[in-house]
Image: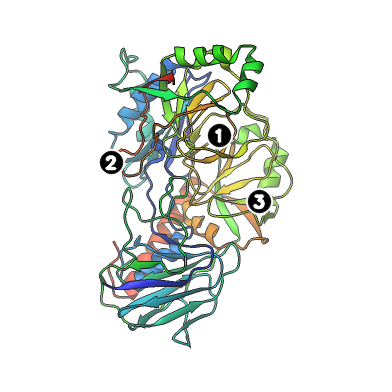
Amino acid sequence: MLRVVSLGEQALLLHWPGVPALPQQRRIWQMSTAARRWPGVTEVVPGMNNLTLCFDPLLVDEPQLRAHIAVAIHQPAPLNDPPTQLHVIPVCYDGPDLAEVAAHCRLTEAEVVAAHTARLYQVFCLGFVPGFAYLGELDPRLSCPRRATPRGRVPAGAVAIGGNQTGVYPSATPGGWQLIGHTTTPMFDQTRPEPCLLQPGDQVRFVAC
Amino acid sequence: MAILQIIKSGPLCSVLDGGRPGHRSSGIGQSGAMDALSLRIGNLLVGNPPHAAALEIALGNTEFGFTASGWVALTGSETQARLDGRNLAWGWCEEVHPGAHLQISAPRPGQRIYLAVAGGINTPLWLGSRSTDLHAGWSGPLTAGDELPLGVEHGACRRRGVVLPQPRTCLRALPGPDVAGFVEEQLTEFWSQPWRISAQSNRMGLRLQGPALRYRGEELLSHAVWPGTVQVPPDGQPIILGAEAQATGGYPRVALICSADLWCLGQLPLGGNLQFSAISVADARLAARRQLRYLAYLAQQLNLTDE
């Protein structure tokens, strides 16, 4: 059941229970698209199993927004994903944690690479740092915990696994995920009108090079 | 073209304005001045639009040179400032002449000074803002030798001043969405006891020291956060997110500072204490409206129209 709670003075938090999964995330994308059109809504931020709506209390109040949400939630589930792009990202699988991940998953390094490149991922949402895309769904065989001690600096372009998720670090930043490779494809470029390469709903395939 | 010369920058002197809210869904935080109220008052004094870019000085002694005539104002934490050897009053619009030399003494760690210049600082825009963003690698702290172009003056300045507001040490806040994951006794402690502001605090957030708060709720996944969100990381020591906080987070949210008190996050001294005080949504919005009325009143008294 969707939970809607007040968040501070001028935001609502919509929270979907359960493990993040594509059908639920499609609902979140659908609600995001609808909410961006409601008068008074100033910002819409999809998360992994949640959606934050910021609003201007001079233009709309909470009961009005809750009424919009109640209507939107009863729309039929989307049949198709929104129009999106497919990104093929070349990866050099030489990450410092590849051996450790293979050992944890009881696979050979080659099997880890095969499992990582076999799936077609979808961008669930962005967050953490500019242009960081949370990708799902990772092959459950590759699931592994975050590092006990996060690195002070993960290099830009690092391809990583954390828990049940995988992603690419767009820029050098502290990080706790397991690094299995790197790509030179720029995930984030300030000079572009749309600086983030990956958008929610986009599909991603990794290719070993 | 008028230039603001950085002669001595100190380690943390940056160009900041009202920030770039609205891009959290790209993982881009809003940045902007840590004490947006003092920025706004400074801009009012020199006839700028309220969110025009100014310098935020957070550490170290600084010195500036001016190549052209203009007007400046100093707001935020009061220290010693000298313009061509003459002491400057805080909260006043002052005229500078070509070749003028301005020295400002270091603020206390955790406190910030705003140097507003008539016309605003005219560095490049990104997503509508001139503010630095360290996560995105946009701009950064200034160094000696930097030369900043200034914009054209908006309003006719004259020598005028205002009494500056004093920051609160008791921050009014709304309960966060994850309070159910904390036991009642710990929540009572959170709201009633003084918290020490650690020396590890910075623009990303104020790290607080006190009894550890233990979260027993379900694990949270990535969600939007903003300045004023009070998170509780695994070590149990709360963090109040600041202007340069990331766009999303995953730690439990125990409280959210009301918008009217956010400016205080830029003025509380490190090593000092703060407390939290619960406020209702209605009272939080009332406080926000009062602050807008205060700024409108200042603008009227300064014979300007605020936007």
Residue on which the image places disc 3: B208
Q: Are marks 3 and 2 in contact (CB under 8 Å)?
A: no
Is the C terminus of chain B in the top left, top right, bottom left or bottom right quadrant? bottom left
Tell me the kind of residue under disc 2.
Answer: Pro
Query: Is A193 positioned to the left or the right of B237 in the image?
Result: left
Nearest-to-viewer mark from 2 and 1: 2
SS at badge 3: strand
Q: Are marks 3 and 1 in contact (CB under 8 Å)?
A: no
Tell me the kind of residue under disc 1.
Answer: Gly
* Residue B305 picture quarter: bottom left
Residue on which the image places disc 1: B250
Query: Is B16 positioned to the left or the right of B59 in the image?
Result: left
Q: Residues within 10 Å of mark 3 (few under 14, many from 20)?
A: many
Residue A58 percent across, percent down from the top left: 33, 47
Residue B150 percent across, percent down from the top left: 31, 68
The residue lying at 72 percent from left, 40 percent from top is B185
Nearest-to-viewer mark from 3 and 2: 2
* Residue A70 picture quarter: top left
Residue on which the image places disc 2: A193
Tell me the kind of residue under disc 3.
Answer: Leu
Look at the image and tell me whether residue A204 can be seen. yes
